[in-house]
Amino acid sequence: MSTQWTDGRTDGRTADDPWRRSRLVGVPEAGQAGKDAAVLHAVQADLHNHSLNSDGLGDPERAFAQMRAAGLDAAALTDHASTPRDLVATLSLEQYPTRDALALGRLTPRSIDDAKWLRVGEVADGHDAPGEFTAIRGFEWTEPWLGHVNVWFSQAFVPVLTPGSTVGVHEFLAREERTALFGYNHPGREPGRLHNFAVPGPDLDPGATLPPRLVATEVFNRTEDFLFGGYAERLPSPVVDVLDAGWRPGLTGSSDEHGRSYGLVGKGRTGLWVRELSREGVREALESRRTFATREVRLRLDAALDGVRMGGRSDTGRPGGRRTLVVDVDLPDGAGRPVELQLLTSAHPEGTAPAAPNTVRPTDPADAGVRVVARVPARLGELVVTDVEVPDDVAWLVLRVADPARRYGAAAPRDHPANCWALAYGSPWS
């Protein structure tokens, strides 16, 4: 797949923009990741937005134009697909574990319908311009107690037909939309926590097709960082639980916009390393986990661990041991600003999975399940090449770019080294 960009753009966002190129190119210590970076370009994306088609206030006819004007290269409209009203009237404790859960399950937002789904596809097609801007239609499967799931690149949408259970959306993906991609949104915000993010078994997904297609988990949603999501209730990190469950998604950010204006500064967004700016290029980058999450406009992050790009798998099958870390993190308006590079993994014993549905995983409140195995001082705009010692008992690693001078911004373990502001997260190595 070659890199395709339209020449002569008037907004300056062309392939020749130096911001789009990784500094890993030509760095011997970056290995294969540095060679691959030569044909990749960074783009800014927001793949989770709402409109008047569900519970948003924005005009769906104008949304893509607004997002493009705000500087995004790729965007999606993902209005809610909720529990049908006639089904809401029948909900009972047969579907939910408690009365509180049942009450939440009844609070369904306004849902997209067939006519709106078809129209969003037409609008997205009208604004999609390969080489200039990528417009994508998607939907958000919305179970108010259990959790929310974004779906992209599907031909149809599915409402919540199995209230209190993820079976409906997983069956839809495994049996009806076998090429669609999906992601877990604001993980842990809803108390059902998607059944503690359990991976479906062979009865539902006999070919194990779902794990490769869970391409995204939001670590930033709106202005929030979900690393310690739920800590106020002393719940374990939902990001750690997703990864410990066995999923290996890319980490993403989104604005989850419900207002009249799109692409607002300060909200989550996703960085993608694409081979071409097109729907196929965005899809391929998501499938390859070449993503990073940020709340900063035009922050760029690329990283390699022993030559493996973030989001990739180690040749040894494990990221542990003495490793060479190469990091390119840049923010044009923040050059020279001090940051800390943190390598995160699970603080839970190796091989343990999250708790069974409707139970709470035992977690030390001093760490919420998050373990920092390496801390490296750095500055924005300066390439980092360093050796780090990674314990052998880790199954995955996540790179976090932090501002240690600023607090996390929500409830978090008081003396934890990650109790500080995150500028970005890379997708996990495993």
Image (tube, grey):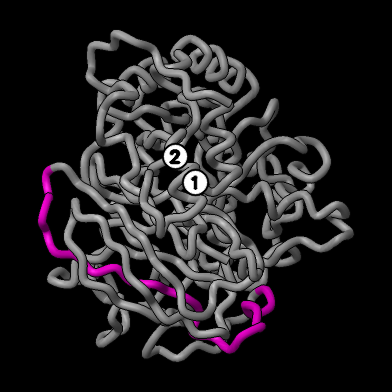
Residue drawn at x 41%, y 69% is 324
Mark number, residue 273: 2
Residue drawn at x 27%, y 76% is 419
Residue corresponding to mark 1: 290
As for residue 345 lying within the magenta part, the answer is yes
Residue drawn at x 44%, y 39% is 273
Magenta extent: 333-357
Q: Contact, CB < 8 Å: mark 2 with mark 1?
A: yes
Residue drawn at x 88%, y 54% is 206
One can see residue 195 in this view: no
Q: Which amino acid does the dot numbered 1 rest on?
A: Arg
Dot placed on the residue nearer the N-terminal end, 2 or 1: 2
Q: What is the secondary structure assignment of the residue under circle 1? A: loop
239 vs 115: above or below: below
162 vs 305: above or below: above
Classify residue 310 as left or right of residue 411. right
Q: Which amino acid does the dot numbered 2 rest on?
A: Trp
Quarter that holds the N terminus: top right
